[in-house]
Image: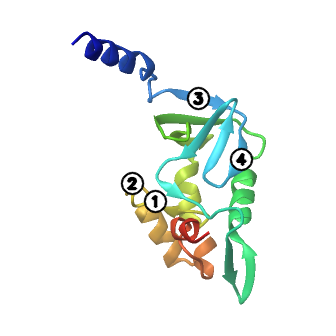
Amino acid sequence: MKLIIILLLNFFIFNSFSYSKDITGFPTVLDADTIRIGKLRIRLEGIDAPELKQVCVKNNQRYFCGKLSKVKLQEKIGKKKVSCILTSKDKYSRYFGVCYVEKINLNKWLVRYGHAVAYRRYSKAYVKDEKFAKDNSLGLWSGSFIQPEKWRKKN
């Protein structure tokens, strides 16, 4: 019984991070769905972007769609501060969050303009934005691509 109490206390002490915490700073864009602010790696929640080495096709031309998506995110942020609302933490010690530059939700923006897809397995928050991008042939939807999660499994 004493062991159970000690384990429970340790759990609450070491897992007491407030996941509704805000963090603001100048980010380093690691890829189109992961940034770093200070020492924190933040995975943009509810979206999935192509991997940096992932190849897509547009107008019969192959291109590195993950690199392009990363560049689009870097351009959107520019030299501005980014604010993130952190919601949880994964097994890779990344925090999940919804991030903003000024008042623009970056997670939503990436999906709405076709630089990422809605990660339906974890969230339905950006499904309408993905439909908008697909219906308007924006970004990834202007050509052909493999869903990032499927691409990762193959590679």
In screen coordinates, is 61 left or right of 35? Answer: right
57 vs 132, nearest the viewer: 57
Furthest-bottom residue in this view: 60
Q: CA distance from mark 4 to mark 1?
A: 19 Å
Q: Please rate how many residues cluster around mark 3, counting C-alpha atoms within 10 Å: few if below 14, some from 14 to 19, many from 20.
A: some
| Residue 123 tag number | 2
Residue at position x 59%, y 77% in the image? 145
Q: CA distance from mark 3 to mark 4?
A: 15 Å
**Residue located beneath label 1 in the image:** 119
Q: Amino acid at mark 4?
A: Val
Furthest-top residue in this view: 2
Which of the image's four quarters has the C terminus?
Answer: bottom right
**Place of residue 112 in the rendered image (x, y in percent of width and height, measured from the top left):** 54, 63
Quarter of the rendering containing residue 25: top right
**Place of residue 68 in the rendered image (x, y in percent of width and height, measured from the top left):** 73, 65
The answer to whether the residue labelled 2 contacts the one labelled 3, judged by CB atoms less than 8 Å apart, is no
Task: Say what secondary structure mark 2 lies in.
Answer: loop
The answer to whether the residue labelled 1 contacts the one labelled 2, judged by CB atoms less than 8 Å apart, is yes
Q: CA distance from mark 2 to mark 3?
A: 22 Å
The answer to whether the residue labelled 1 contacts the one labelled 3, judged by CB atoms less than 8 Å apart, is no
**N-term-proximal mark, 3 vs 4:** 3
Q: CA distance from mark 1 to mark 3?
A: 23 Å
Q: Please rate how many residues cluster around mark 1, counting C-alpha atoms within 10 Å: few if below 14, some from 14 to 19, many from 20.
A: many
92 vs 24, nearest the viewer: 92
Residue at position x 55%, y 41% in the image? 92
**Residue located beneath label 3 in the image:** 23
**Place of residue 31 in the rendered image (x, y in percent of width and height, measured from the top left):** 68, 53
Q: Amino acid at mark 2?
A: Ser
Q: Amino acid at mark 3?
A: Ile
Q: Is residue 116 visible?
A: yes
**Residue located beneath label 4 in the image:** 29
